[in-house]
Image: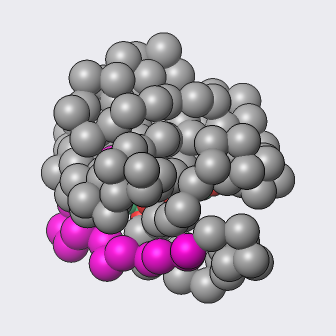
Amino acid sequence: MKRVITYGTFDTFHWGHMELLRRAREMGDWLAVGLSTDEFNAIKGKKSHLPYSRRLEILQAIKYVDLVFPENNWGQKRDDILKYNIDTFVMGDDWRGRFDNLADVCNVVYLARTANISSTLIKHSLQK
Ligand code: C2G
């Protein structure tokens, strides 16, 4: 059983998120998502349009996702990888290199971001 993990805010869920989760899930048989809490987003300097509870409900409805758990801080990844017995850690390549320190406990893979879509773009068009 190949187990995959990824992390993110997944605000105003969109095609780019879907493509990341699809490709991540296709790397194994099981995918866990560390979903940034509203409090952690404040630390990340992000204000999400949707609160954690809504973002959680959306991810739980996505067929590629097997487990969603809270991401409370930057430092929990190593513990999560060991706790969930993860084989592969996946992030979009805007994070390329940032998590290479995890390569001693799992495969670290950066996937190309999906072009021309982002939560920021969606939020700005919502505000027009
Ligand atoms: N993503 C993508 N293509 C896009 C937009 C996002 O592939 N057009 C990917 C990002 O690279 C990331 C995931 O979708 O891997 C979630 O994106 P965000 O919600 O923006 O996540 P972020 O705020 O980068 O949080 O500890 C890691 C952080 O929690 C990552």
Tell me: 34 left or right of 58.
right
State the residue at coordinates (23%, 54%).
22
The quarter of the picture where residue 103 lies is bottom right
Q: How is the image coloured?
A: one colour
- The image position of residue 88, as x and y in percent, is 51, 65
Observer-nearest of 86 and 69: 86
Q: Of 84 and 77, which appears nearest the observer?
A: 84
Residue at 76% x, 56% y: name it: 78
Q: Is residue 66 left or right of residue 14?
A: right
Give 113 or 87, whichever is nearer the viewer.
87
Residue 65, position as x, y percentages in the image: 34, 37
Residue lying farthest to the bottom in this orientation: 97
Tell me residue 10's x, y (percent).
41, 41
In this rendering, the answer to whether 95 lies above or below 97 is above
Residue 87 seen by the camera: yes
Could you tell me which residue is drawn at 38 percent across and 44 percent down? 30
- What range of the chain is rendered magenta? 107-122
Viewport quadrant of the C terminus: top left
Closer-to-camera residue (80/16): 80
Q: Is residue 24 left or right of residue 74?
A: left
Residue 50 in sight: no
Residue 27 drawn in magenta: no
